[in-house]
Image (cartoon, helix red, strand yellow):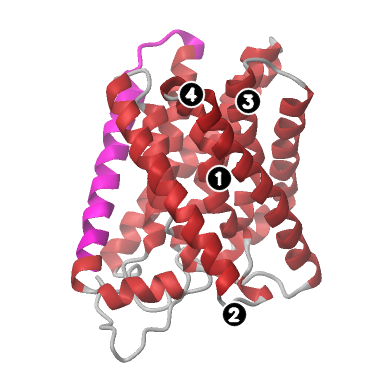
């Protein structure tokens, strides 16, 4: 996910708080995704969940920290928040707030079902509101152009598809089916227009290039949710799984381009999709009984852990250097 450049108007101060991007919540998505993948790894080996429990605490702390800063921005710099909401690209990142809560609900399911339930309720309700508001903004406003379209637009969709993973444990199945249906429908619609934009229009700006990884997330999460809903591995689940695998393979020839990009918060777009595919591999191994899927999952988990560690270090360095929370970042 990314922090797209936003030209502030004369009424908006150019201080660090004004330029604190809503896309910072994508950091929580990555760390929470690693938490869930780690618990899957621990379960696979029969290990105690100490590491994933620690990561859950870390994910929660990061969410609270980012949330408090953004609340301060809302209270002290409301014009800057409204400017982000009206921005044709940044608006897609607001649902990352609720997605992070849903991921924390999934991550805490084995720890405390009551905590998981409340995180799920707040996250699911908030995400439904964000989904309606974002789609309404897309429909009602004329400021959107093809160049604004990018894979980050899948973020509101991914949240709806995530809801059933823990939702099936907390509410009637029809609630989860509602969210899944909305997410799947809009994934198909947006996939069509995003692919059209990628093929027939100008290339993505450098800062948006990492968002290509987001293509992996909807089918990977869709597979996990689908198997949770139907309780078995079926042809529909396999289609979603292998779609995610294909999008991952499609990213491999782009690695050279990604490596040459200057650092930006958009690099966190690598994290959650990798986590989603890693978890999907473990689920596929459990459902199919085919162990090579698990072995590949181990390998991808190592990549995921290295990516998260690298992103964390690079983000901290950028914060110390003052490279983040500045105009055009």
Image quadrant containing the C terminus:
bottom left
What separation in Å lies between label 4 and label 1 (alpha carbons)?
Answer: 20 Å
Numbered tag placed on residue 158 in the rendering: 1
Q: Are marks 3 and 2 in contact (CB under 8 Å)?
A: no
The vertical placement of 114 against 79, above or below, is above
**Residue appearing at x 24%, y 74% in the figure:** 77
Residue 325: x and y, percent? Answer: 32, 69
The disc, 2 or 1, on the residue closer to the chain's N-terminal end is 2
Question: Relative to the observer, which residue lies in front, 25 or 136?
Answer: 136
What separation in Å lies between label 4 and label 2 (alpha carbons)?
Answer: 39 Å
Residue tagged by mark 4?
172
Residue tagged by mark 3?
281
Q: Secondary structure at mark 3?
A: helix
The vertical placement of 307 against 4, above or below, is above
Residue 113: x and y, percent? Answer: 32, 20
In the image, is 250 to the left or to the right of 39?
Answer: right
Residue 115: x and y, percent? Answer: 28, 27
In the image, is 228 to the left or to the right of 235?
Answer: left
Is label 2 or label 1 in front? 2
**Residue appearing at x 58%, y 59% in the figure:** 153
Q: Secondary structure at mark 4?
A: loop
Question: Relative to the observer, which residue lies in front, 78 or 255?
Answer: 78
Residue tagged by mark 2?
142
């Amino acid at each position: 996910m990314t922090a797209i450049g936003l030209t502030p108007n004369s009424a908006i101060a150019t201080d660090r708080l004004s330029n604190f991007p809503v896309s910072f919540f994508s950091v929580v998505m990555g760390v929470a995704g690693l938490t869930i993948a780690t618990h899957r790894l621990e379960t696979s080996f029969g290990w105690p969940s100490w590491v994933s429990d620690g990561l859950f605490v870390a994910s929660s702390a990061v969410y609270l920290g980012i949330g408090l800063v953004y609340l301060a921005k809302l209270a002290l710099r409301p014009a800057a928040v409204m400017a982000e909401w009206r921005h044709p690209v940044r608006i897609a990142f607001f649902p990352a707030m609720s997605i992070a809560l849903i991921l924390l609900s999934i991550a805490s399911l084995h720890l405390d079902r009551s905590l998981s339930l409340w995180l799920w309720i707040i996250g699911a309700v908030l995400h439904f509101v964000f989904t309606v508001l974002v789609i309404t903004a897309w429909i009602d406003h004329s400021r959107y152009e093809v160049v604004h379209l990018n894979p980050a637009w899948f973020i509101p969709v991914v949240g709806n598809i995530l809801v059933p993973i823990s939702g099936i444990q907390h509410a009637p199945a029809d609630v989860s089916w509602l969210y899944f249906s909305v997410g799947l429908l809009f994934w198909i619609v947006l996939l069509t227009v995003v692919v059209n934009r990628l093929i027939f229009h100008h290339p993505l700006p450098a800062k948006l290039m990492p968002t290509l990884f987001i293509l992996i997330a909807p089918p990977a999460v869709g597979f996990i949710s689908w198997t949770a809903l139907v309780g078995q591995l079926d042809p529909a689940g396999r289609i979603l799984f292998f779609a995610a695998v294909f999008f991952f393979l499609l990213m491999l020839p782009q690695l050279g381009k990604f490596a040459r990009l200057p650092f930006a918060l958009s690099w966190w777009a690598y994290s959650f999709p990798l986590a989603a595919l890693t978890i999907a591999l473990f689920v596929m191994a459990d459902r199919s009984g085919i162990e090579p899927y698990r072995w590949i999952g181990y390998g991808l988990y190592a990549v995921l852990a290295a990516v998260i560690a690298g992103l964390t270090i690079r983000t901290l360095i950028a914060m110390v250097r003052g490279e983040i929370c500045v105009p055009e970042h």
